Image: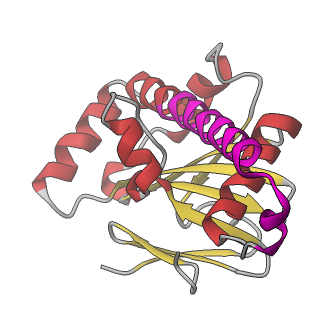
Amino acid sequence: MNPNHSFQEGDLLFEFDPLHWQVRKYDQHSYFQGFSGVGLKGVDFVANFEGRELWLIEVKNYSVQRSIRQKEVDVVLRDPSKIVEALEQKFADTLAGIRAIYTYYQRKERKRWNWLNAWRRPDPEEIFWQEACQIGVETQQIRLVLWIASDQDYAVPIQKIIQGIQNHPNLQDYSVVVFEQDNSPQPPFLKVKFQP
């Protein structure tokens, strides 16, 4: 668990206000490590916003600072639909992972419920995932977020990506938000800045 709620994602530093957010770096979490072993993809962050919305945040940093990044940007510039398909896969696999975690905790709770359970110290990790699962599975208050950073010389076609997301049949039932670094208002109680 990261007590500061600050996470480095490539050249970007994400600072979540701990009074409003509970966050896990999903693509590095032990649960995801098990899921990735069977081929599932995952977003960068799973975040619980004020106990009422589950945010799945995928970060794409297309700043051209290394030749590898230039190749990634060139692919997106040629065909923005590729990023939309990759996003849909990551969002769908992450939601499937969260449902699996939810089932795991439900079964675990049924097996261990007894009078000793009342004396057991709450596990912060378990609390986070149970709350995230309840918001995502039971209330369906899910926000899918794409965070894009790019250089002015290699501007990623944001409008084409947004249009592709809006037209994708598997994404139409969700609230999908695209934030463009430096060109969009930042989400509430979250600061993102370049920190190479």
In the rendered image, the vertical position of residue 79 relative to residue 75, given as above or below: above
In the rendered image, the vertical position of residue 173 relative to residue 195, given as above or below: above
Q: Residue at x 20, y 64 (%)?
A: 65
Looking at the picture, tell me which residue is in the foreground, 103 or 14.
103
Looking at the picture, tell me which residue is in the foreground, 23 or 38.
38
Residue 174 sits in which quadrant? top right
Q: Residue at x 34, y 71 (%)?
A: 11
In this rendering, position of residue 156 left or right of residue 183: left
Q: Position of residue 173 (x, y in %)?
A: 77, 23
Q: Residue furthest top?
A: 169
In the image, is residue 109 part of the stretch drawn in magenta? Answer: yes
Q: Residue furthest left?
A: 67
Q: Position of residue 131 (x, y in %)?
A: 77, 55
In the rendered image, the vertical position of residue 94 relative to residue 125, given as above or below: above
In this rendering, position of residue 86 left or right of residue 164: left
Q: Residue at x 31, y 55 (%)?
A: 153
Magenta stretch: dominant secondary structure = helix
Q: Residue furthest front?
A: 115
Q: Quadrant of the C terminus?
A: bottom left
Q: Position of residue 6 (x, y in %)?
A: 52, 80
Q: Which residues are magenta?
A: 90-119
In the rendered image, the vertical position of residue 15 relative to residue 163, given as above or below: below
Looking at the picture, tell me which residue is in the foreground, 22 or 31.
31
In this rendering, position of residue 162 left or right of residue 142: left
Q: Residue at x 24, y 37 (%)?
A: 74
Residue 28 sits in which quadrant? bottom left
In the image, is residue 161 part of the stretch drawn in magenta? Answer: no
